[in-house]
Image (cartoon, helix red, strand yellow):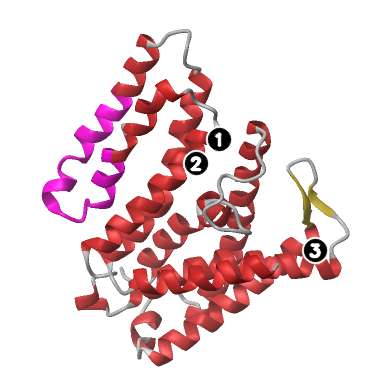
Amino acid sequence: MKTRVITAIIGIAVLILVLFTFNTLVFNLVVAGITLLAMHEVYAALGFERADWPLYGVLVPYTLLVMLSSEDFIRAMLMMGSFFVVLFYSIYLVVRNGTVSFQKASGLAMFSGIILFCFYSLIRLKMLLPIEEYGYDAVFFILLILCFAWGGDTCAYFAGRAFGKHKLCPVVSPKKTVEGAIGGVLGTMFFGVLATVIYSVAADRMEMFSRSNVGVSMYIIIGLLGMVAAVLGIYGDLFASVVKRQCGIKDYGTIFPGHGGILDRFDSVMFIAPFVTMVITAVFYR
């Protein structure tokens, strides 16, 4: 537990430093780096041979292309880049027929796509909500996404320890309980609303956040958003656990002592980030 706490504190400090670069290309490059580390964890978990490194290598320039697509000339190359990656995978499987598993290659492509979609959501927020026009709303929503994911995990952990009796998904994750999941959902809703109140008052963004065409309060929307996000976080965690069990590994990596790899820490973020990004930009910034 001590190691986990120390790692968490260091991680939060690093996160704050990264957010200071938010309005620069450094932020995009850091997000790209995290994305590529997560993809490599999947590549390693699936047990590819050393000779199959091109399956991962081709994802490096493509990920950089996606994460730097805030630049017009780079965004114009995305369709061509996407076509090249798909074509490359297809040709590679034909050339390496009988030596590379289609199932493993498909798993790498699918999981990498989910990871890319997740972290691109943070870049998308930056693109849609520039600081010059919207202040630090995008930074807040990125923190809200992490609050939903990690706050939900924390609440579920303590609720499960205190009240857990009924297994949620014993085959995939024996330690998860229904009571823990309920605690995670309620905790996510509460902390999401609390964080929004603090930011909207502190940053004087109450008027902007309240300006929506839906007939309910902003805080109800955030609460409902947190409820759905908590469920998506649980499914992201279970999905990552399924892959780990089928690959026969305990953790995706060791980059975070006591926590595991990038995917062990960000598994609950995978589906939350795209969902929150789409809803926030549709409801509050139409």
- The quarter of the picture where residue 153 lies is bottom right
Residue drawn where x is 66% and y is 73% of the image: 187
Q: Secondary structure at mark 3?
A: helix
Q: Is residue 194 above or below residue 264?
A: below
- CB under 8 Å between callouts 2 and 1? yes
Is residue 8 in the magenta section? no
Q: Is residue 225 above or below residue 88?
A: below
- The quarter of the picture where residue 204 lies is bottom left
- Mark 2 sits on what residue? 41
Secondary structure of the magenta portion, mostly?
helix
Which of marks 2 and 3 precedes in the sequence? 2
Q: Secondary structure at mark 2?
A: helix
Give x and y (percent) for residue 119: 40, 54
Is the residue marked by circle 3 packed among few (<14), some (14-19), or many (20+) residues within 10 Å?
Answer: many
- Mark 1 sits on what residue? 45
Q: Secondary structure at mark 1?
A: helix
Q: Which span of residues is magenta-colored?
A: 61-87
Q: Compute the Cα span from label 1 to label 3.
A: 31 Å
Give x and y (percent) for residue 35: 40, 49
Left or right of 235 on screen, residue 281:
left
The circle on residue 179 is 3
